[in-house]
Amino acid sequence: MTDDLEGRVALVTGGTRGIGRGIAEGLAAAGARVLVCGRTAPADLPPGVAFRAADVRDPEAVRALFAHVAEAYGRLDLLVNNAGGSPAADAATASPRFSRAVVELNLLAPLYCAQAAYALMARQPDGGSIVNIGSVSGSRPSPGTAAYGAAKAGLASLTRSLAAEWGPAIRVNCLVVGLVLTARSAAHYGDGDPAVQRAVAAAIPLGRFAEPADIAGPVLFLASPSARYVTGAELHVHGGGELPPHLQAAESRADHPSVN
């Protein structure tokens, strides 16, 4: 795969930290020329990675970002729609402004970026590839982040539709990502309690949280010619998923047999 991505141009939204930074590092190590974007400049960047300020929720900012890509690089081979996320909020009281912002970031922004990427990739003889970073929250209940889960479910649907509309020149796929331990997420899983975090990790079949590098590998695969016949797909990168509630309840009962 290293040779496959040599000289390729990749854009990673939200690529200055966390999962996005891990993806950007992996792409750069594989020989790609990588541009990351975010609302604020990072203190540092990995070798081989450039930065451009952009708020991908703003269609005008997206147009300016991709105009820069065209001018500075002359082409675009890979778009990774990684920017996303949401703070916790009670669905009963979340404000319209809050819900709108969550949907804009996690669903509309990837659409805006994909449309702009299409304009560049469609005129290239070898087309291009788009990878959307989804979430397990889009395929199971997401209490506390209902709007986020709904947006990620929409992103999976968007992936299939764009793959059908834009093939064969452009491949569009989605990673369904599970629990990833980053500087920002550490406090979220188990409220920062190491004991609770260990218990959560133990419920994952692979026995641990993912690291950003674990997400970069599948992106590299989907961007490479090895995945030339893969489009409209959802690749689950979640360590085997989360144990079903009935198994968790049975395990808890076994640990506490006096509970009725």
Image: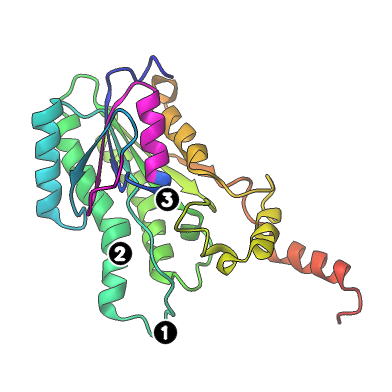
Quick check: 107 above or below 49?
Answer: below
First-in-chain label (3 vs 2): 2
Which of these two is toward me, 244 or 210?
Answer: 210
Quick check: 172 above or below 242?
Answer: above
In the image, residue 240 lies at what x, y percent?
Answer: 64, 46
Q: Residues within 10 Å of mark 1 (few under 14, many from 20)?
A: few
> Residue 10 falls in which quadrant of the image?
top left
Q: CA distance from mark 3 to mark 1?
A: 24 Å
Q: Residue at x 86, y 80 (%)?
A: 259
Q: Is residue 30 left or right of residue 162?
A: right
User: Disc 1 designates what residue?
Assistant: 92
Q: Which residues fall within the magenta stretch? A: 20-44
Which label sits on residue 103?
Answer: 2
Q: How many marks?
A: 3
Which label sits on residue 134?
Answer: 3
> Could you say whether the residue bearing mark 2 is in a helix, strand or loop?
helix
> Residue 247 falls in which quadrant of the image?
bottom right
Examine the rendering and report whether any part of residue 3 can be seen.
yes
Q: Are dots 3 and 1 in contact, CB under 8 Å? A: no
Q: Is residue 59 left or right of residue 84?
A: left
Q: Residues within 10 Å of mark 3 (few under 14, many from 20)?
A: many
In the image, residue 26 lies at what x, y percent?
Answer: 41, 31
> Could you say whether the residue bearing mark 3 is in a helix, strand or loop?
strand
First-in-chain label (3 vs 1): 1
> Residue 191 falls in which quadrant of the image?
bottom right
